Amino acid sequence: MICLTCQKEISDYSNYCNFCGAKQQTPTGGKRLMRSSTNVKLAGVCSGIAEYLNVDPTLVRLIWVLLSLIPGFVFGGILGYLLAWIIIPKTPPALPAASATPMSSAPKPA
C-alpha cells in the first residue's frame, strides 16, 4: 500500500504511515475482523473479535466459554471456533521499530 500523503510504501494493513504519521484510509472503509497475532491464547479468534468490538478479550473468551457450556451449544461452540479459525484472516505481525540512533561500523574509543 502507498501512503496517500508522502507516497512511500507501507504495510497493507497500516492505519497510519510509519514515515509521516498520516492516517490511512482502509480499502473497505472501516474496521476488518481479523484474528489477533499479538494477544493469542489458542488461535486469536476471541481476541480478534474483541479488537473489532473494542471490548476486553477476556470478556469475549468468558462469554464464548459460558455459551459453549449450555447444553446443546457445546458442539456448536467448538465448531464455531474452528470455523472462525479457518475463515477469519490473521493480522500480519507488526514490523519492529527502527532504531533511533544510526549504527556505525567504526570502533568506539576506549
Image (spheres, grey):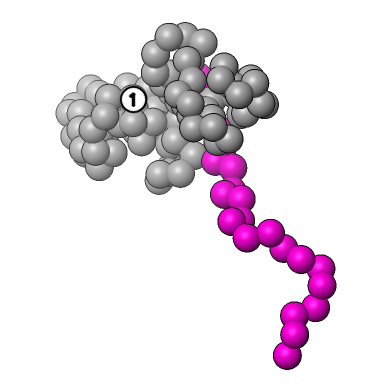
Q: Give, as a single range, the part of the protein colored magenta.
A: 85-110
Query: Which one is in front, 13 or 7?
Result: 7
- The crowd level at tag 1 (other Cα within 10 Å; few <14, some 14-19, many 20+) is some
Q: Quadrant of the C terminus?
A: bottom right
Assess whether residue 86 is covered by the magenta stretch: yes
Q: Regarding mark 1 in the picture, which secondary structure is present there?
A: helix
> Is any atom of residue 53 visible in this view?
yes
> Is any atom of residue 75 visible in this view?
no
Q: Which residue in the rendered view is the most extreme toward the bottom?
A: 110
Residue 28: x %, y % from top left: 47, 9
Residue designated by label 1? 52
> Up-down: is 12 above or below 101?
above
Taking the spot 39% from the left edge, 13% from the top edge, the residue there is 30
Q: Which residue in the rendered view is the most extreme toward the right?
A: 106
Query: Which one is in front, 31 or 23?
Result: 23
Taking the spot 59% from the left edge, 56% from the top edge, the residue there is 100
Image quadrant of residue 107?
bottom right
Residue 56: x %, y % from top left: 24, 38
Q: Main secondary structure of the magenta part?
A: loop
Q: Is residue 102 left or right of residue 95?
A: right
Residue 88: x %, y % from top left: 48, 22
Query: Which one is in front, 7 or 58?
Result: 7
Q: Is residue 57 left or right of residue 36?
A: left
Taking the spot 33% from the left edge, 31% from the top edge, the residue there is 51
